[in-house]
């Protein structure tokens, strides 16, 4: 039995019967059978259905958002924004998938030669609880528009949301079994990956989960895409616009109660502006309203589970024991952890070396750009970095020096359907979104015509 519990009220929301082996087999058989017809549909037909999905999401966004908030504690307004972003990615691929997957003509010695992009079949998505709709839709929209079939193993604490996602596609008129949410726990994932009807797997989650899934997929010679953890740096140079940069840094760290892979977790300040920046940063963090996630004025809710708050508390405490200075916060009440700032953080300290998943940020100073780049690249992760400076020429020279999958100048790192999203090093491999994402799970087929 899989149980869903509200992390704010601690009340049980729902219980779900886990699928047995026969039920899993039936679901995969239905998915594989549906692929044989779905792959033959036209882009026009797929686009019509995907636009219907966008309409369904926007028309019932509060219904879906409330379940997100109840299951994992995201403030309601942020849950609504998440649903709206899902509608955006659906409309984006409804409008662009056909040209992104059009035959690519290549001039050779042949009479005619080109590369075609064709669907591969059933793709398994293993998704986390922190953005329980968005993480799924940024996979599902391109996968289905490419002619593939989606099966989802969602995080066990957001199974009602998982059901809702399947419901969205059904309400929009997609053929039955084009997208299925499997009610299974993590112990049954291996069986699904190894099933011959499953052709590929994508995972968003932790490094241990990614290593396990990639290993199994590798043994089966199946394509995998991994989007794992991150410890993004927010690098503020002395010429930055302090007021606007502080706003961006507060949002980068504390939205979704800090539970984001791409959140800015390490604040790196050039020494000359540390005092001025911190004065405004502390002021703005103190203004963040904590409270009931269902209250539309709440910005900081609870963490998705109490053990996650305990983990964050431990990381902060260890950092302070190692020499960090607690500027504000540091207190926990069950699954709630108050916004926390720790300054004087250096290499080797917990909050610098480990991924922190919650409303706590470390502050480190640097002397010059060489030291800043070195501090950023010292992380085992490589998801993204934000740099803040008024000098675009200076920023452009720095960009190639960072090892991350994304560099944002004067803005927080964020996902956008029009841009590829993914990381390097322990943050994973492969890309989601844009034309790069939709081409991850296709057969790039070389076609060559010649006359005798």
Image (cartoon, grey):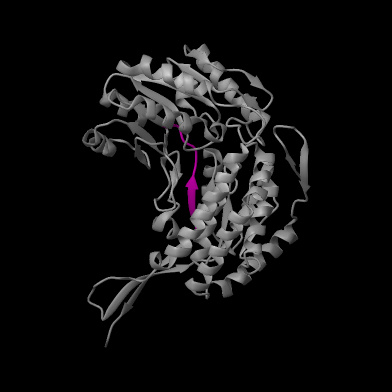
Q: Could one spot residue 1 in this view of the protein?
A: no
Residue 398 sits above or below residue 86 on the image: above
Residue sitting at x 45%, y 24%: 352
Query: Is residue 66 rendered to the left or right of residue 201?
Result: right
Which residue occupies the foreground of this view, 312 or 85? 85
Measured from the top left, where is residue 35 in percent x and y? 58, 70
Residue 381 sits above or below residue 348 on the image: below
Measured from the top left, where is residue 153 in percent x and y? 63, 51
Res 396 → quadrant? top left
Which residue appears farthest toward the bottom when viewing the image?
452
Residue sitting at x 78%, y 46%: 15
Measured from the top left, where is residue 368 in percent x and y? 26, 22
Residue 24 sits above or below residue 14 on the image: below
The magenta stretch is: 221-232
Res 31 → quadrant? bottom right
Measured from the top left, where is residue 119 in percent x and y? 49, 67
Q: Which quadrant is home to the C terminus?
A: bottom left
Q: Count all numbered tags in the image, as a single digit.
A: 0
Query: Is residue 142 rendered to the left or right of residue 291?
Result: left
Q: Is residue 222 magenta?
A: yes
Residue sitting at x 59%, y 64%: 197
Residue sitting at x 57%, y 64%: 52
Q: Could one spot residue 97 in this view of the protein?
A: yes
Which residue occupies the foreground of this view, 380 or 313? 313
Q: Is residue 144 magenta?
A: no
């Amino acid at each position: 039995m899989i149980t869903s519990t509200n992390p704010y009220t601690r009340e049980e929301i729902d219980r779900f019967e886990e699928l047995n082996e026969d039920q899993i087999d039936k679901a995969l058989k239905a998915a594989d059978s549906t692929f044989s017809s779905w792959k033959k549909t036209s882009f026009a037909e797929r686009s019509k259905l995907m636009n219907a999905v966008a309409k369904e999401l926007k028309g019932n966004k509060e219904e879906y958002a409330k379940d997100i908030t109840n299951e994992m504690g995201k403030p309601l307004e942020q849950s609504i924004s998440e649903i709206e972003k899902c509608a955006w990615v659906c409309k984006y691929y409804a409008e662009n998938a056909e040209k992104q997957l059009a035959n690519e003509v290549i001039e050779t010695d042949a009479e005619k030669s080109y590369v075609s992009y064709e669907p591969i079949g059933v793709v398994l998505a293993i998704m986390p609880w922190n953005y329980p709709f968005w993480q799924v839709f940024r996979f599902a929209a391109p996968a289905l528009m490419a002619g593939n079939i989606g099966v989802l193993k969602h995080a066990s604490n957001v199974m009602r949301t998982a059901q809702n996602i399947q419901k969205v596609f059904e309400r929009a008129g997609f053929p039955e079994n084009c997208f299925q949410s499997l009610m299974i726990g993590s112990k049954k994932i291996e069986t699904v990956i190894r099933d011959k009807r499953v052709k590929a797997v994508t995972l968003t989650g932790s490094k241990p989960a990614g290593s396990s899934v990639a290993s199994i997929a590798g043994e089966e010679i199946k394509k995998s895409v991994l989007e794992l953890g991150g410890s993004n740096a927010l690098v503020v140079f002395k010429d930055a616009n302090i007021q606007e940069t502080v706003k961006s840094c507060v949002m980068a760290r504390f939205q979704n109660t800090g539970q984001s892979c791409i959140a800015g977790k390490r604040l790196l300040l050039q020494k000359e502006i540390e005092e001025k920046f911190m004065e405004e940063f502390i002021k703005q963090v103190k203004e963040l309203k904590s409270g009931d996630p269902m209250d539309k004025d709440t910005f900081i809710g609870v963490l998705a589970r109490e053990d996650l708050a305990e983990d964050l508390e431990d990381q902060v405490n260890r950092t302070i024991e190692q020499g960090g200075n607690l500027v504000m916060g540091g207190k926990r009440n069950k699954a709630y952890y108050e916004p926390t700032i720790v300054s004087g953080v250096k290499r080797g300290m917990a909050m610098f070396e480990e991924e922190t998943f919650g409303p706590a940020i470390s502050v480190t100073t640097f002397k010059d750009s060489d030291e800043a780049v070195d501090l950023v690249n010292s992380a085992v992760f490589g998801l993204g970095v934000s740099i803040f400076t008024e000098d675009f020429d200076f920023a452009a020279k720095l960009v190639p020096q960072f090892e991350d999958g994304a560099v944002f100048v004067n803005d927080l790192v964020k996902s956008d359907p029009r841009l590829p999203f993914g990381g390097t090093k322990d943050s994973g491999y492969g890309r989601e979104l844009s034309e790069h994402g939709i081409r991850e799970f296709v057969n790039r087929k070389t076609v060559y015509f010649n006359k005798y």
